[in-house]
Amino acid sequence: MRLSGSELVESREIMPGTWMQAWHAPAIVSGARAGQYVHVRTTEPGGLPLRRPYPIVTTDPPSGVLTIQVAGPASAPAAAWARGLRAGDVADLAGPLGRPFEVDSRSRHLLLVAEGPGIAALRMLADEAIRDVRSVVLLYGATTASQVYPSSLLPDEVEYVVATADGSLGHPGGVTELIGDYEAWADQAFAAGSPSLLGAVARHAAGRRQRLGVATLGRKRGGGRPPAPGSPEARRKSFLQVTVEQTIGCAAGTCQGCTIMGASGAMQRACREGPVFAADELDWGPE
């Protein structure tokens, strides 16, 4: 982790209630990977300092600039803080923090599934995949057309498929209804969004082998002991990885404020063991 007194390069509203901020933070950019986050020191109403986690959306190593996405109603403290910033303002950023996504070297086709602000956590993964000559399909769900992530903010190489609940753009319905069209094509899948979305995608992925009768990226017969759950090796061999949205207080694993139930019954900390997990590491509960 690196602490950086970072200067705001640009702040603009990309969708109603959603701001994209570019920060000059070369010390953080140099070690950042998709799925990690920064802890930003904000000032709440009344002058109370508070740190908030934001996924790293993109990085540009030559310029040392990273972007984050701030979303929420105008009355929310984080949104009010974002609206009050101007280019040249300085904030304290800590990062890169958390565990990143793990892509298996054999994977050539990546399926990304996101809804709402969750796309911020997957955006950098698309950049890394294209850099490594992988194909990417992004399935995105929103309530209505005005809330759809702008395609202009995505690399041209990404196949972008949209679903809206009211049918105003793309597929009429939920984004999970699109997964079946791509699961046989995908070598690995990655999801970000609400707990209900992640649970639905995880339960769907759990039945993939039986449904399609396909091989997995697992170990060879006689290949020795399987990798430990939660290790980078185990996550690379998992078909589905998810990134969870939790309130992260200390980002050091001590306050236990960002815990989520693991499949083994042990609590997992989003700030340290996550925010990225293999789907089978977590307890999704009843449907």
Image (cartoon, rainbow, N blue to C red):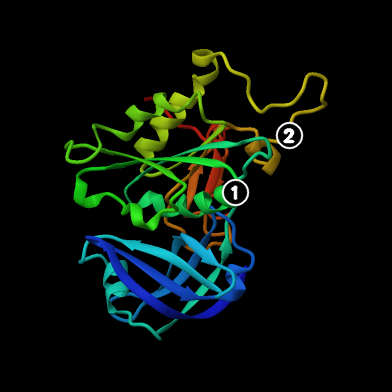
* Residue sitting nearer the eye, 96 or 170: 170
Q: Residue furthest front?
A: 156
Badges 2 and 1: C-beta atoms under 8 Å apart?
A: no
Where's residue 65, x and y in %? 51, 72
Label 2 packing within 10 angstroms: few (<14), some (14-19), many (20+): some
Quadrant position of the C terminus in the picture: top left
- Looking at the image, residue 14 sits to the left or right of residue 52; the answer is left
Residue at the image point whose x is 50% and y is 49% from the top: 126
- Looking at the image, residue 154 sits to the left or right of residue 281; the answer is left
Where's residue 144, x and y in %? 19, 45
Q: Which residue is mark 1?
A: 273
Q: Amino acid at mark 2?
A: Pro
Residue 181 to residue 93: above or below: above
Mark 2 vs mark 1: give the one in front. 2
How far apart are the alpha carbons under marks 2 and 1?
16 Å
Q: Which residue is mark 2?
A: 227
Q: How many marks?
A: 2
Q: Is residue 159 visible?
A: yes
Q: Amino acid at mark 1?
A: Glu
Residue 86 to residue 206: above or below: below
Where's residue 269, x and y in %? 54, 49
- Looking at the image, residue 160 sits to the left or right of residue 74; the answer is right
